[in-house]
Amino acid sequence: MSGDTFFFYAFSALALLGGLGTVLLRNAVHCALALMTSLLGVAGLYLLQGAEFLFAVQIVLYIGGIMVLFLFVIMLVNLDQASKLQQFGRQTPIALVVALAAVAAIFSMLSKSAVLLPASVSLTPLTGGNTETVANVLFTDYLLPFELVSILLLVAVVGSVMMAGKRTE
Amino acid sequence: MPQGYLPIFLFLIIAMAFPVIAILTAKLVRPSSPSKLKLEAYECGIEAVGNSRGRYAVRFYIISILFVIFDVETVFLFPWAVRFHQLGWFGVIEIAVFLAILIVGYVWVYKKGALEWV
Amino acid sequence: MITYTSTDHFVLLPGLLLALFGCAVLLLDFLFPKDVKGRGWLVGIALSGVGFASWQSWQQYLYLKAHSMTPLVAFNGALVLDGFALFFNGIVLASAALVMLISYRYLEDEKEHHTEYYALVLFAACGAFFLNGGLDMVTIFVGLELMAVSFYILVGFLRTDKRSNEAAMKYLLLGGFSTGFLIYGFSIFYGLTGSTNLAALATVIPARGANDPLLYLAIVTTLVGLLFKIGAAPFHMWAPDTYEGAPTTVTAFLAVASKTASFALLLRVMLVGLGTAREMWEPLLTGAAVLTLTIGNLAAISQSNVKRLLAYSSIGHAGYVLLGLIAGNQTGLIGVSIYLLTYAFSTIGAFLVLIALRRRGVAVETIEDLASLGKRYPYYALLMLLFLMSLAGLPPTAGFIGKYYIFLSLVESGKYGLAIVGALYVAVSLYYYFRLVRSMFLTESIEAQVLAPSNGVRLVLALTGIATIAMGILPEPFLRMAAISLGR
């Protein structure tokens, strides 16, 4: 097993186990920490792909920012009460069957299809660093979605303050 | 895997192993005499009142979500900064538009009083 | 090299204007006094934003007409201006304007009148524009999220109302989940083509061959996301709760703008991106359409809440529109366009009657609340009758034209089975619409308090009423409009 393969399985295992922990653990803070390990595993996978910018973003934004937010939200709710509640409805067995069936279907479809890229499309090797490449694409081909993102963020700002803000007047 | 990350990975392993080893060694070496008093939260000698997982004010949430949103904005600045020279004036205008729209959001939040603590 | 050409500007301008006016409404809020008059000014500014965007869209139409409707591609293929985008932009603009006109008094009554509401309506319309005209999957995704996030907030706008909160919560969670599916599908498309452009997708599919499992997986997951957005079964669960809990004005906007823009996206993805893989998605969509018709129409029968009933009927309507896409011929596509146009006016009208009656002190919740409406408020009752007839597809109203074209296209393409199923459910829908009518005209009830409706409500009632009847009697101009959507 080469180094890359080893790291791929290691990071994948981290991501999957973290995901399972997020769903199955009872204490909400533990769930958040499990989610953090899951995100860390995904960050490792990005790194394996050579997507260093995404790796850094994953660490800074998801593990740094969004997890802090999650922990704050968890502290907003009454944990003692929440941990006593029944966390899953009676549909758990059905949901489990459906989820496993979906996973099996997706897995079989992915494994049946060997070639991902058609021959006509060639991947150009990266010249320069990953962040430079992201910048080149982001500010040329994806100029429009990039500017749209700022409006999306503006709406998110408005939404969060409207929903959680104190009632003026 | 891109080259040059092995030292970082080794550091990560060492950093994670360090507390594990320290705690395990301590557990092996120390004498064990558990008592109920030892399990209580230590609050500078003052007796603990209530649960440490009390509910927070919703203001913390607003601050943290605003932090995340403006954090996302900063992330978009990085690629621009890296390619500052190549992108030239057009890049500056582009990022200025991006920031201007978000500053609208900032001014709105400020005027709305969402950042006021009291 | 990065550029921003005059073509880019011309194609973008209506959406840009909506966003700019949205920002202006947010900021000017602090300059105007916090009273009825100050808010009135801001509604005017928001409406003028829609007005400017409409004017610019009209300029775009004139330009396209002068250039024999040749599509105009901008931003390296990320955004396209063609008749199709223009037509659906028009529906979005019209619904945004109508919704703003009726929201003023409604929000005053609910004591939740914040001018951010109008900014969010503008932003949602702006997002919808990028669904109507988007060719690039990244642009489409960001536009979709812009629209969706605006709607999440609008649905939960009545912060002290538990049902509004619940509706927003359900819509947010399920919406996020469905977007996850959509973006998973898009990511596989990217893997297949090495490009995020829908046009590039069309060129790759023939090379992959029929029934390629990976392509199939991408189509299925993309469809999950898109069917959720149009409120089609089996991903319709959010619709009744969200429609019921949301402020009624937002319900009308959600049922019209969000649905039509999502249909525009569905059509664009299926016909432009996956047009050559028709045999792969047609069975899936056929199943979804039949299921949607069944669930929407059968569940509507047992509803006692009017908003819920209209929600289920709107699920049913999504099924009819899907039938037009499945028929796949020119008649079917004209049918889809004209159906969505007629549906827009009838739906806003029907919800508006509920709003107007609520204004009059009758809290319209259950069907019984409509009792003896014909005697108490004959005008409203007649208008409601008109809108319900249109929704049911009876002549001489607008809805008939839409259903006529859908069924015509099914017959033309030889899909008799689907036509029969559709006709069967029209009969079912007549039953539950008639329940409302019977309650309005044939049952007795106590007299309720009388209040005058606002001028905005009066105006929009008149507009939607006239449009609904005009499209039924004189369909020619509207059919020409629908033909624009096909680039003719």
Image (spheres, rainbow, N blue to C red):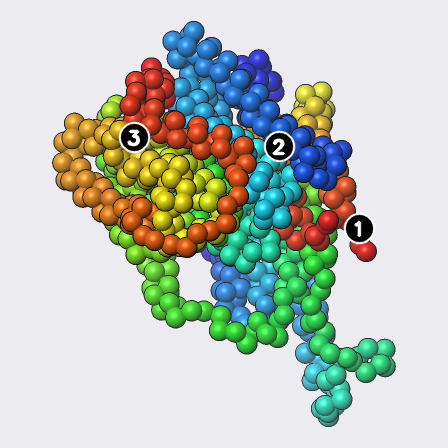
The residue type indicated by label 2 comes to Val
Residue C397, numbered label: 3
Q: Which residue is mark 1?
A: B116
Image coordinates for residue C414, horizontal then vertical, percent: 14, 31
- In the rendered image, residues at marks 1 and 2 fall on the same chain: no
- Circle nearer the N terminus (2, 3): 2
Above or below: residue A105 compared with residue C252: below
- State the SS at label 2: helix
In the drawing, does residue B2 fall left or right of residue B24? left
Q: Quadrant of the N terminus of chain C?
A: top right
Q: What chain letter is assigned to the residue under label 1?
A: B
Residue C43, numbered label: 2
Image coordinates for residue C335, horizontal then vertical, percent: 28, 28
The residue type indicated by label 1 comes to Glu
Residue ID at (29%, 41%): C319
Q: Assess disc 3: are there few (<14), some (14-19) or many (≥20) residues with their C-alpha within 10 Å of its C-alpha.
A: many
Q: Quadrant of the C terminus of chain C?
A: top left
- State the SS at label 1: loop
